[in-house]
Image (cartoon, coloured by chain):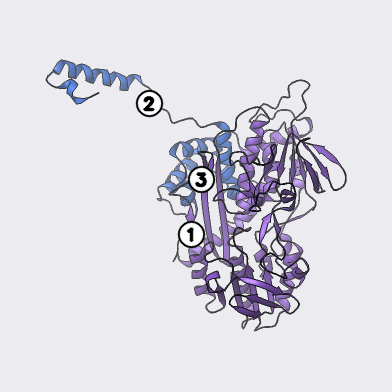
Chain colours: A purple, B blue
Amino acid sequence: MSRTRRQFLSSLVGAVAASTCGSLALASCVQPSGRRAPRVVIAGGGYGGATCAKYLRFFDAGLNVTLIEPTRWYATCPFSNAVLSGLVDESYTRLGYAGLAKLGVRVIHDAVRVIHPEKRTVMLSGGAMLSYDRLVVSPGVSFRWNHVFSGYDEHATLSMPHAWNGGPQVTLLKKQLVAMADGGTFAIVVPALPFRCPPGPYERASLIAHYFKSAKPRSKILILDANEHFSKQDLFEEAWDTLYPGRITRIPISAGGLVNSIDSRRMSIHAEAGKFKVAAASVIPFQQAGRLAVSHALADETGWCPVDHQTFESTRVPGVHVLGDSCLAGAMPKSASSANSQAKVCSLAIAALLRDREPGAMIYHNTCYSLAAPDYGISITDMYRYEDKRLRVVQRAGGLSPLGAPLEYRAKEAVYARDWFTAINADSFDA
Amino acid sequence: MSECCYQGNLASYVCGALVLLSLVICLPVRASENLDEPYLQLLAASCRICHSDGVTRLETPSLQDLTAADIKRLLSAFKADSEPATIMNRIASALSDEEIDQLAAMIGR
């Protein structure tokens, strides 16, 4: 039998203390005499950062890997809509870092405050200074307050939570949904693409419609959308017709769906189509790369970070790699699965570069499930290859779940959606 | 080699055929292209988004339980759309036969 993860992990555990070569490490782990182990620092412990930390150790057990993440528990965005609708408890979406520490990743709960690319050092908020040979920045997204949606700032998130990065915002929105009177309207305000999790707003509408069906039978859902079309549109609309006829109304941009201003105190939303008074709302702000990336000029005028698709090294700041939602990765959507896949490619490339080897061929993968109901799942998947210096989708493969499939098929995909969540958490966090 | 080499000349035809035959016999059957080990590890890592080891799932199979022959047969059948699937047929369609062979050999039991 060739190299399996099982063997690899057991070799890693042995390699942790001594950084000696596990039999399965791809690169030679023996340090040339007198040479220290190459150091990789990773800023941000979401799906991108966590996966990168783990797979750097996977591809080269001789690397010194440090993960910097302020929180001790990562709140996932996947399945946060299931928390909102009461399908799963909030603890289901909470992941820790003990698994990565066991694999030999040094986990520091602090934040990177300043990057000095010319000195190859980072300063943490707590004052510590760390040197790196390669830095990986995986900070997710940041929100653009008052951008297009005038009046929507951090304070307004208390009345109309975005609930777009898991954790307390999700808990708050859930409380508001439970507290709202039957018959009231719940609004979802959608920003223009690109944003984290393109099908997320529509999964939110679906699962809250499911909750309303039994808990608030007279309540409706209104989607005010700054886009014309959306991810998995035909599949979602088929599901809404089947499961929630008449409950969900979507106003696309061409029909006045663009929101201009928000009055969170009066629970009022002004869109081009008119003024809407709502009982509860989730306003998803316009987005850009994470704050650390924006403040260190890793992002360009689009607000996102251009990278070399073979290595995910920034095209603007040498020695710094940008992963996940913050980076511009061609046709790959901003999803947990994309971040996981990009992190694997990036860690393989870094492992090569740190041993003076050229990175080789690369393959990338995204699989994204959405639930329209607890037993109704739909999916999209795509594979990508590095060709002609770009990441390109593989033609005649991938794609969406079929339209018009029987309910048994949807039920099967709902089970696979839960399995996907279990598996990606284990793969990324060893959780 | 153009057709006209053989016209009106049985000897050279036979000779040409023998040369061709000897080439077929002497050349090894073209082995499938060997993919780089790091690339194969990356490809195998892609599977773990849904098939990671060591956790209990409801239905998604663990790859640890499958032999290399099982994995090759299943991936090939998914690619040909001859095995029922929800998502694996869409994924396997992206893989070459070489990738399927060598990936199966790497991750199979």
Q: Looking at the image, is mark 3 or mark 1 nearer the viewer? A: 3
Residue that sits furthest to the right in the current view: A127
Q: Is A136 situated above or below A151?
A: above
The residue identified by callout 1 is: A401
Instruction: Name the element at disc 3.
Output: strand
Q: Nearer the viewer, residue A179 or A147?
A: A147
Q: What is the spatial separation of the Cα atoms under label 2 and label 3, in whole angstroms?
A: 32 Å
Residue at image coords 22%, 19%: B16
Q: Nearer the viewer, residue A20 or B9?
A: B9
Asked whether residue A215 appears in the rendered view, the answer is no
Q: Nearer the viewer, residue A137 or A205?
A: A137
Of all chains, the one bearing label 1 is: A
- For residue B71, side relative to residue A278 (left or right): left
Disc 2 + disc 1, Cβ < 8 Å: no
Q: Position of residue A417 (x, y in %)?
A: 58, 58
The residue identified by callout 3 is: A392
Amino acid type, label 3: Arg
Q: Looking at the image, is mark 2 or mark 3 nearer the viewer? A: 3
Q: What is the spatial separation of the Cα atoms under label 2 and label 1, in whole angstroms?
A: 40 Å
The residue identified by callout 2 is: B29
Residue at image coords 62%, 83%: A218
Q: Position of residue A317 (x, y in %)?
A: 69, 40
Q: Residues within 10 Å of mark 3 (few under 14, many from 20)?
A: some
